[in-house]
Image: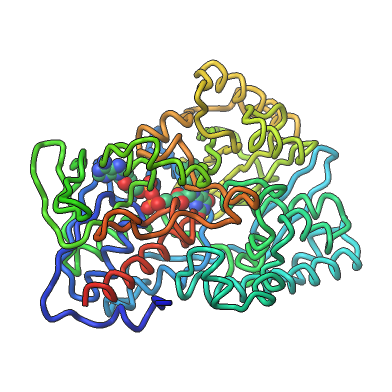
Amino acid sequence: MQYFPPGGQLQEKTMNPKKAVIIGAGLGGLSAGIHLRNAGYAVEIYEKNAHVGGRLNVLRAEGFSFDLGPSILTLPHIFERLFTGAGKQMADYVKMQSLPVHWRNFFEDGNVIEFDRDRQQMELNNPSLAADDFRQLDNFLAYSRKLYAAADCGYFRHGLENLWQVIRCHGPLAALRDFDAFSVMNDGTRRHIRHVQLGNAINFFVKYVGSSAYQAPAILNLLPHVQFHYGLWYTEGGLIKLAEGLHRLATDIGVRIETNAEAVQLRHAGHRIDSVILKDGRVIAGDVIISNLEVIPTYVRLLGEDRRFLKPLDKFEPACSGLVIDIGSRKQYPMLAHHNFFFSNDPKKHFRQVFKEYKLPDDPTVYVVAVTRTDKSQAPAGCENIKILPHIPYIQDRPYTREDYLELRERVLLKLERMGLAGLRQNTVVEHMWTPDDIQKTYGSHRGAIYGVVSDWRKNLGFKAPRKSGKYANLYFVGGSVNPGGGMPMVVLSGELAAARIIHELQ
Ligand SMILES: Cc1cc2nc3c(=O)[nH]c(=O)nc-3n(C[C@H](O)[C@H](O)[C@H](O)COP(=O)(O)OP(=O)(O)OC[C@H]3O[C@@H](n4cnc5c(N)ncnc54)[C@H](O)[C@@H]3O)c2cc1C
């Protein structure tokens, strides 16, 4: 079996530069492009939108600056490798800041549980948790650390892509034991933590992958270790600065990026893609083609593959979508931390409605970001920049209407007002709302999913699609629909692993 370790191989410069053509300048495409360029490849990226960064996107209105996409940043060392590989310092491009308060979790009975960077601070800030609860949390975090170590040594570092590779790498018994293979996340949580609300808050780390704690495999319980050990980060000036920094790095090292350049077809001769056809009719040839568009949309829209070909990909069901509400408020809400969760009264029902029944939830758990807690530049003086994101089903065969989404918006805002954000609607200066249809239209994501492929024990054991096409010899994929999956650090890692494999195969 071939492994493709990040690092090492990527440093090699090829004598005879090969050309990589990348469709899409999201984090996955940028990562693959930068790593390949660092190894001496000629790289061209064609992006359909006017901006670079994909879901890292910004809306500026009335003095507010709204990050329309991601807001929680973890594992900065994965981003750092893009810069060090090019002989640059990340700090010269992006200013990263570690947040002392990770999340504040609000519950309907008025209780609040805060996750902090500093353990002593966390004990001081959580009078509702007893010494025994902290002991259980410590036990849980030791379990989480072991899960992370298991995933890191093969799945992350060597780019393992399926159960058989994991079993061959770890050995059958270790694979089952180290991955807590017969449990879902909620089982692992409740085995360690008796405090119901603390367990609910821990379960919601599944937010990072847009899945359900009752369906995602227990290996995803590595996520709390990721956050508590490696920290939770912000890029000064908004997350859009990460995209801008990577754009500048790519340009500095000679990656050619063209925006407003949509790919409409991949032309192939047998099982090799020979060129990418752009909307304006240009034909772009390359030795390797990398699609940052998700796997299923690539096969359907750019290659016209039929249902029979696509059937085996059904297990790679989309992760959830979201209703993205950005509010500029003239009133400030000091109760909010930078990141907050307002919990459903019945979190299990919330997960069931979104991930099993595919319904808009009656009482969702709502993620709320108040970025001005850290960065005053994101709103006019005295105002609050509030991003509200309930997870909701991806676009169904019978899609929800805008009216359905507006009803959900009202339920969400009423819930937030009831739980402490009094007068939120009356104090709104500017509001922007994005539905799954907008997300699909803007980024071309499969059914409006925001994190690529869902992590589901029964459907896919948490694995995503492979980074290399099984049909076309020189077609590779990066981004949230392939291993190791969605979320910013993971899509950047997917780009690094795809680049390592290409370098290995083409040398
Ligand atoms: C609202 C929201 C909140 C999120 N919150 C978080 C968070 O807090 N933390 C976190 O880590 N992650 C979060 N995520 C997920 C994270 O944003 C994604 O996992 C990641 O940015 C995806 O990167 P990507 O490169 O895979 O895809 P994308 O960013 O979608 O990039 C794909 C690119 O391809 C382009 N493209 C598509 N079709 C074509 C075509 N035919 N021709 C040319 N170009 C094309 C698209 O325009 C896009 O620029 C969030 C996402 C959303 C939407």
Give residue 61's quadrant in the image.
top left
Query: In the shown orientation, is residue 360 left or right of residue 127?
Result: left
Q: Can residue 358 be seen in this view?
A: yes
Residue 87, quarter of picture:
bottom left
Residue that appears at 81% across and 37% down: 108
Q: Which of 320 and 52 is in front in this view?
A: 320
Q: Can residue 375 be seen in this view?
A: no
Residue at 60% x, 56% y: name it: 461
Relative image position of residue 506 (x, y in whole percent): 22, 73
Q: Which residue lies furthest to the top in this view?
A: 403
Q: Position of residue 133 (x, y in %)?
A: 87, 63
Q: In this view, does 259 lie above or below 149?
A: above
- x, y (%) of residue 397? 50, 25
Viewer-nearest residue: 326 or 134: 134
Left or right: 212 in relation to 267: right
- Up the image or down, 111 lies above or below 230; here it is above
